[in-house]
Amino acid sequence: MRAMKLPVTRRLRFSLRALLGVFTLAALWLGWNVHVVQQRAALLESLRTMRTVDVYTTTSCTELEPEELGRPEGMSLIRYWLDDESVTDVCFCVAAGSSPPIDYTLAKEVFPEADVYQDHRGASWR
């Protein structure tokens, strides 16, 4: 009687070059996300130090702790893990006829989820 031959299970095989390519792409993607989060954090910090700018984030508009809120709607999981902050509103309170202290379009580009607007009532009301 012949011994039955067991079927050979073929495992996934990848070349070292393919693995290096996948890890390089993953590292580039992660590095880009870290850069975006750092850029947002730097601009958010500079906006918070200005007297004529009001910044509202998801955590500043609630009584709950950030851990209790969970991940904001629309934020990717990787950005949440990197401690990105979801900005809801940015208000530039400038005097009539003057320009905001930083580039208004920069805030719109860096915080696409936020409602960025200018309030021309004047800085004296603050």
Image (cartoon, rainbow, N blue to C red):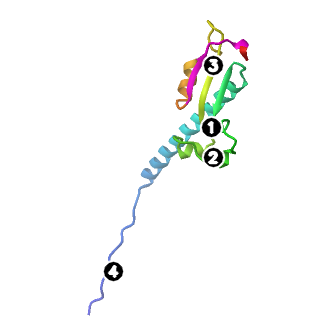
Horizontally, is 12 left or right of 105 in the view?
left
Query: Cα distance, mark 2 to mark 1?
Result: 9 Å
- Whole-angstrom CA distance, mark 2 to mark 3, is 27 Å
First of labels 1, 3 by sequence position = 1
Q: Tell me what residue is drawn at x 66 percent, y 36 percent.
A: 61
**Front position in the image: 41 or 31:** 41
Residue 25 picture location, percent across and down: 47, 44
How far apart are the alpha carbons under marks 1 and 3? 18 Å
Image-quadrant location for residue 54 = top right
Disc 2 or 3, which lies upstream in sequence? 2
Residue at screen point 55% across, 39% down: 33
**Residue numbers of the magenta segment:** 114-124
Q: Amino acid at mark 4?
A: Leu
- Dot 1 amino acid type: Thr
122 part of magenta stretch: yes
**Residue drawn 33% across the image and 80% down it:** 6
